[in-house]
Amino acid sequence: MEWSVDIESKAAVCGDDDTLRNPSTPGSESRPKDEPNVSRLQDCPVGYPRLAAFLDSDENFMVYRRFGYAAARLLLHKQADLQKLEAAMIEMDEDEELERPGCLQSVDLGDLSSPRARLMKDLETKFDEWGKLLSTAKELSSMSRPAESEYQSVRNYIQSTRPLCEGEEPRIDCKEDLVTLRRGREYAWLDVTIEHFLRLFRCRVIDYIFRSNETQRKADDDDKSPIYYTRSRIERLVLLIITMTIVALLVVPIYLLYHLTNGIQQGSHTTAVSIGTFLAFTLVFSVIMAFFTSAKRHEILGAAAAYCAVLVVFFGNAQVIVSPGPGT
């Protein structure tokens, strides 16, 4: 097939005027040369193009089905085929052991058109198909499930816009069969919470801080269009919150213990206060480890023990400095 090129159209696209239209992106609008190209939802044709643009517009919207039931049916069919071939191979081995003793001691199959050669070839083909299907099913089943907010966002968009004709709309109601393509993040729930508050208290200052120019150009600024926030800016805020939380968990208990026990004669009262403070902040630390990170149970246990030990050492050193022994 030959493609004809309109020279005037090409000159208009690649000319030296102040605007440039990128023909490689459907629905791209005219833009200055120095600005990156952003695909806007409203510029994409209604139907599959606009739905694809929506799902690709944010990593939280990359929600698709894994077809677990269909995969299980295929696995069962392939498994049944393999079982039949395996039974045929065992039966052939038993017959040849009786008819031709010693033939099974060699891997040589003889004539490639022999029944055993054909059987082994079919078995190899079926086993290869089974292995690929099994690996694909395992990979799909290990993918992350979409969060409730992600599921509701995609579901609301599809139900409100109805982008596809009846019978071809995605089965978004199959919640247990959905997976997300976004990368796994340790603080995903905190990201969602921050986005919720940003939308709840939305104003020009919040838009200026958390929405870049490219992000704002993805959709029209109206009630029907989704609101996008720049992912990197939210991640910086999450990192700042985590850092401040870690610093607070180290400083606050030492500060409280110092003021609670300072000037009080050492005894059972101060010991009880210290132990209670250690236990309370260790519990808070463990909860934060469980919710803010993807640490396993034994990792949380080890981190909590190390944190408690650090508090004990810091507090012990502080007590020695504040209350020096006799003769100093």
Image (tube, helix red, strand yellow):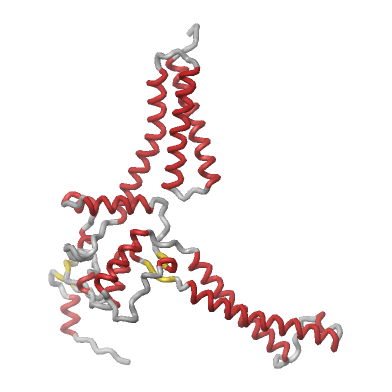
Classify residue 177 by image quadrant.
bottom left
Judging depth in this view, the residue of 263 and 122 nearest the camera is 263
What residue appears at the point 19 percent right and 67 percent down from the top-left corner?
Answer: 33
Q: Residue furthest left?
A: 17
What residue appears at the point 18 percent right and 63 percent down from the top-left corner?
Answer: 223
The answer to whether 248 appears left or right of 131 in the picture is left
Q: Position of residue 287 (x, y in %)?
A: 44, 42
Judging depth in this view, the residue of 199 and 129 nearest the camera is 199
Instruction: Decide if residue 122 is in sight here.
Output: yes
Judging depth in this view, the residue of 109 and 182 nearest the camera is 182
Q: Is residue 180 above or below residue 293?
A: below
The answer to whether 10 appears left or right of 288 in the picture is left
What residue appears at the point 54 percent right and 78 percent down from the top-left corner?
Answer: 74
Q: Is residue 299 above or below residue 4?
A: above
Q: Residue furthest top?
A: 327
Classify residue 8 by image quadrant.
bottom left
Instruction: Decide if residue 59 is in sight here.
Output: no
What residue appears at the point 21 percent right and 72 percent down from the top-left corner?
Answer: 28
- The number of numbered discs placed on residues in the rendered structure image is 0
Q: Position of residue 17 (x, y in %)?
A: 13, 72
Classify residue 61 by image quadrant.
bottom left
The answer to whether 182 appears left or right of 135 in the picture is left
Q: Quadrant of the N terminus?
A: bottom left
Q: Position of residue 21 (x, y in %)?
A: 19, 73
Q: Position of residue 226 (x, y in %)?
A: 24, 63
